[in-house]
Image (cartoon, rainbow, N blue to C red):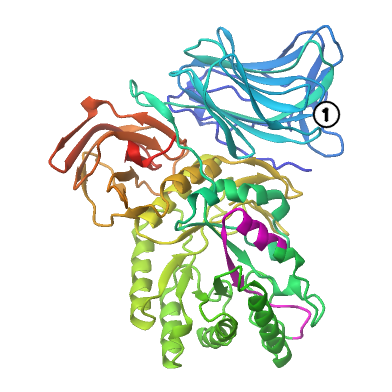
Amino acid sequence: MVKHHRRPSLALLLAGTLVGTLVSVTASASAAAADFTGDFDTTAPGAVPAGWSVSGGGGDATAQDVPGTVDRALRLKDTSTGAPVTVGTSFPSTSSAVDTGFRLRAAQTSATVGVHLDGAQGHNVTVALSADGRLYTYDGTRRVDLGAYAADRWYDIRVVAHPSTATAEVYVDGERRAAQLDFRTSATALDGLRAGVSTADTGTAWVDDVRIVTESAPQGWPYLGSIAPRTAQQVGSSNLLVGAETLDRGYTDYQAFGPYLGRLGATGVRLQGGWAKTEQTKGVYDWAWLDRIVDDARRQGLKPWLQLSYGNGAYTGGGGSGLGGKLPSSAEALAGWDAWVTAAVKRYKGRVAQWEVWNEPNLAGIPVADYTDFYVRTASLVRAEQPNAVIFGQEAGIDVPYAQDFLTRLSQQGEAGLLSGISYHPYNADPDNPWTYQQVAKLQALIAQYAPGGVVRQGENGVPSRPGSYGALGDLDWTELSQSKWILRRLVNDLGRDISTSVFSISDLHYSSKINSKGLLQTNTDKSIRYAKPSFYAVQSVASLLDSTVKPLPDYSWSSSSSTPLTVRAFAKRDTGRQLVGFWSASGKPSENTVRTSTDLTFRGGDFTDPVLVDLRTGAVNDIPADHWSVQGDTYTFTGMPLYDSPVLIADRSAITL
């Protein structure tokens, strides 16, 4: 495995305090705007990383190349049964929440290896690999089992610790395994991270990609817990989808990211059918690759949305077999296309209800007349096999003239009944850009005119998590922080307008020339998953809260004391009417800091009995003190609300699950 050299922003703090990183430890507030690395790539093999110290005497802890890979990590090697080996780093003492991520691996299942968040009194939160093959943590003094672990396998661990309540949550590979865990020792602040192999055991362990960030909350607002993630099966139905594109070209690996799909909570997944991958020899179909994906996604509770797209080089005139590819054109290729489409629908019509015809034809330079004829040809084949199929036309960049021409031609041919809707791809660095939704409104009006009953869906959109990424918006500087903010703002914007919306993509995509880092999951260069990015957990919060049990309130009446533009999107529970109202600073491209300002908000037509504050990015839920809100009739006033360029909700407590 080759790891990506990247510039994560997770060392930026709300209050201008820097939490220690693997490369260096500093208390300098002025350093908070610098770039930091959370890995050991730049540490020479055999050296103790700067800012870390080794103790215990039972062995050593140094940066080393991981055997069988070109990956470098911090290796703990304990050779003594009478002494431990411990390595640690310190950071400025903080009473704010500490969100820590790291990867952990052991060379055996017969030694106890622990990673600890420490305070002045010792270990407060521990995640450990036991000498009997179990992953575990603690709830106070009680050991809590987190499942079995295997030797020589990396585990992606996230620990969120809250000194204000002396509690913590633990996630493993994107799944919350434990919550509301009491600290092991009494502490009101945290100041260090330690890893070690126990005194009685010998063994080798590896730690990598340590990421530590503090997250402050309004002073005196009690922490209640975090949003409970829900799987796709638990959610059941929503307007939230996730992209799993390019599997047909091998740019991602379903076996690697598949286990994370259901954990995310999105209830639909966009896939590409892959004519060229399925029919590598004319007339011979190999469906095994797609069967595995469709069946596993369905097993996890996701509804596949299958795109019929891209050509096949096995045929002369077979069209382009990748992004920007042309339509098949020769008689032989078109006959091959027809046969493949018919076979695909016949095979999957009991498992797939939604289809899409081609990918971004306008960006590929395909004339709208050609695309219209091709759409009719393909959609007719789909409906012949599956009369109730939902079929989307496609275009990118919200090209209203292209869509209008397509719809006009479709109507003139008397084939508007073949269209269930249009899917658009609105890449824009500002997720609140009014132009985007003005164009969406135009598309909706066109659909209503030419294909009544059809819908407009956001089918592919995302931003990178690092600069220099492949694809749309890759020329701008992005980090994992700004990615998570951007995704949240777009999702809440779309869902607040009752638009079905998809996150592009579940995993980083490995194009031939460069990585497209729009994934919610960080990858190694062999496409295996390295860790879940902050955006993965942020989307989990959205999926858990904004499902089909809530409805958007598009005409919600509100006002604010803020001198900067705000976006407000309101929702209500369908059964009780209790509300969830999101607000954020509509400040263009998201910033690289989490500094909050204070604003007062007034909601007319509100419905709350016990309002709480929810930060979708962190998942944290805090009580809103009684002196910060008041109600007169159905007008609610909230004062001193923390505001920044990422969505925060004022939600009735009955509408959330911790």
Work out whether 466 lies above or below 198. below
Q: Amino acid at mark 1?
A: Ala
The span picked out in magenta is 292-316
Work out whether 24 lies above or below 397. above
Residue at the spot x=63%, y=77% of the render? 345
Does residue 462 appear in this view? yes
Left or right of 648, for residue 544: right
**Is residue 578 found inside the magenta-colored segment of the image?**
no
Does residue 253 appear in this view? no
Left or right of 232, for residue 331: right
Residue at the spot x=41%, y=86% of the render? 408
Left or right of 610, for residue 492: right
Location of residue 63 by image quarter:
top right
Counting from the top left corner in percent of width and height, residue 623 is at: 33, 28
Counting from the top left corner in percent of width and height, residue 238 is at: 45, 56
Q: How many marks?
A: 1
Work out whether 491 lies above or below 221. below
Work out whether 446 lies above or below 570. below
Q: Residues within 10 Å of mark 1 (few under 14, many from 20)?
A: some
- Name the element at disc 1: loop
Quadrant, the C terminus: top left
Location of residue 435 by image quarter:
bottom left
Location of residue 195 by image quarter:
top right
Closer to the camera in the image, 25 or 204? 204
Q: Which residue is mark 1?
A: 107
Residue at the spot x=33%, y=81% of the render? 449
Quadrant, the N terminus: top right
Closer to the camera in the image, 619 or 481? 619
Counting from the top left corner in percent of width and height, residue 318 is at: 72, 82
